[in-house]
Amino acid sequence: MIKAMLRTLRNQKGQGMVEYGLILGLVAVVVVGLLTSMGTQLTTKFQTIVTALGG
């Protein structure tokens, strides 16, 4: 029984999956932030173009 418990404690597959999940979550937050920032800038650029064209 002790050997089974030690084997379970040494199993790190679950830990790796949690780490990948955290990294993926962080990347998703950064991407959403960048797209939000870029979206505002793109809207401003398009509005400038429309104004310059007389629309």
Image (cartoon, rainbow, N blue to C red):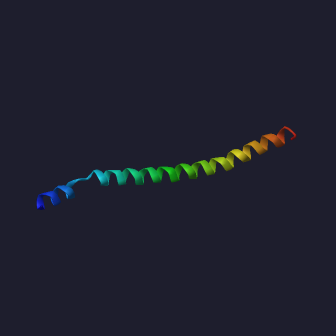
Front residue of 45 and 13: 13
Quadrant where the N terminus sits is: bottom left
Q: Residue furthest right?
A: 54
Front residue of 31 and 11: 11
- Figure disc tally: 0
Q: Residue furthest top?
A: 53
Residue 19's x, y, as percent? 36, 53
Which residue appears at 69% of the width and 44% of the height?
42
Along the horizontal axis of the image, is 32 left or right of 20? right
Which residue appears at 44% of the width and 50% of the height?
24
Quick check: 33 above or below 46? below
Quadrant where the C terminus sits is: top right
Which residue appears at 20% of the width and 55% of the height?
10
Along the horizontal axis of the image, is 5 left or right of 25? left
Along the horizontal axis of the image, is 13 left or right of 35? left
Residue 41's x, y, as percent? 68, 47
Along the horizontal axis of the image, is 35 left or right of 30? right
Which residue appears at 28% of the width and 50% of the height?
13
Residue 28's x, y, as percent? 50, 50
Residue 52's x, y, as percent? 83, 40
Q: Residue furthest front?
A: 1
